Image (tube, coloured by chain):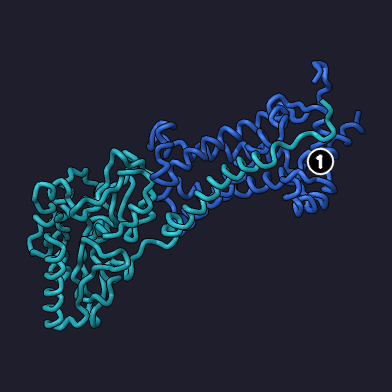
Amino acid sequence: MSRNEERLARFNFQERAIHWLAALSFLYAALTGLALWSPRLFWLASIFGGGDTVRGWHPWGGVMFSLVLGCMFRNWAGQMRLDADDRLWLRQAHRYATHDEEGLPEAGRFNAGQKMLFWTQFASTLFLFLSGLVLWFPEAMPRSLRLAAILIHPTAAIISIGGIIVHIYMGTAAVPEAFRGMIQGWVRPRWAASHHPKWYRELKKKI
Amino acid sequence: MSLPHTVAKLIDTSSCIGCKACEVACQEWNDQEFTLGTGGSYQTMPDLAHNFWNLIKFNETEHDGRMAWNMAKYQCMHCVDPGCLRACPAPGAIVVLPNGTVDFNHQNCIGCGYCITGCPFDVPRLSPKSSKVYKCTLCSDRTAVGLEPACIKACPTHCLSFGRREDMLGKAERRAGQLQADGFQQAGVYNPAGVGGTNVIYVLAHADRPEAYGLPRDPRIPWTVWLWKGPLKWIGNLVLLGGILGTFLHYVRYGPRRVHDEQE
């Protein structure tokens, strides 16, 4: 890599700030949530100031994450619509995972996997937020709602955390340079052409 | 090895006169600040409260066309299989003492309120002041030194008794038999099996209609609580550990996705 290598802007500052605010509030809500999930994971509470603190602040972490995710939705929802190519891609996602990509439809700015993660997080956060409100104020809520919320909240959390585990892996170890795209905001043209060819060609056209 | 014997409280509703001595004794012993409930009823409070753990419900009913009061002292039932404990995430916040008492340990309680949802009898209450949950302790601070609970001590009609669980069950059966001989054919003992039995046992003159005493017919730990703390927990563990292990193995097997046609 030469020092003067060409740089392509991947994510602007506003997109990156929202992404990392979401990441931090998600990590806080997820780890404190796991502390409340089972007595065996309660030791996590001691890292975050003890049980009382976690019970008091976990809901605010969730509210923060929900708000930031709302901003992210405004940023990206339009670009996250699945097209015909994406659907074809998803049906053969296992080939992407095993690096056998011959004949796979090309990705735009976001590939179909990233789009699915976006919609999964959006849906699970909606459920987490609503059921979280019920669990936050148990005595103000009807019993039937509470009985539903104790199932909905952890189910949505399991789906959400499961998705994020894969997301963190993809964004760090599995796809080198993707991390720099989200931290410093730029990628090499070659990287773009390989991972997001449709997006790369669009950018080239504009220049 | 001999285990300490399990204790139980017996409430013979047929000899309760609604004097509320048990309520006063409970408030006194536990040093509760008294907050008067809303009026319009002989009942002291509309319901249990974080600072009111023992309530005589004045259930107005009709028997053979005549008005009747089914008075029933209401408090924590000290279930053998406590739903509150199943739901609690904080280790040591809810404990079952060797004598069967279900006790809350407030140093460990975080005030999440899950126990309120887990309880089939709707007993625990959150204190807005301390943000902790409170309920009847079966006077664990008295029973620990060989005293009976305060409510038992105060009862003037001996409608309340306290002792070994087997003894109390025997006494309850005998009293129910007496009531049957007196013409209350449906008299019986309330010791619901759905929660493994309770350490607070009732004798009801109309045991076929526990609802008439403000008691649930077939209390059970809610199935959503069972699903939440049972299978869902394993699914969660599987997704968490499977996700971490799976991505790691993927890296070991396939490695990173490199940029194609790169000469470096």
Residue B203, compared with residue A145, is above or below; it is below
Instruction: Report the quarter where the C terminus of chain A lies.
Output: top right
* Whole-percent x, y for residue A76 in the image: 73, 39
Disc 1 target residue: A108
Instruction: Report the quarter where the N terminus of chain A lies.
Output: top right
Write the residue at 42% across / 57% down: B225
**A133 left or right, relative to A195:** left
> Which residue is the extreme one toward the top?
A3
* Whole-percent x, y for residue A129 in the image: 55, 46
On the image, which quarter does residue A99 sit in? top right
Chain in blue? A
Residue A153 in sight here: no
**A14 left or right, relative to A55:** right
Residue B195, compared with residue A96, is above or below; it is below
Residue B65, compared with residue B132, is above or below; it is below
* Whole-percent x, y for residue B181 in the image: 12, 83
On the image, which quarter does residue B219 sit in? bottom left
**A27 left or right, relative to B22:** right
Chain in cyan? B
Crowdedness of circle 1 by 10 Å Cα count: few (<14), some, many (20+)?
many
Say which of A195 and B75 sits in front.
Answer: A195
> Which residue is the extreme one toward the front?
B253
Write the residue at 85% across / 48% down: A103
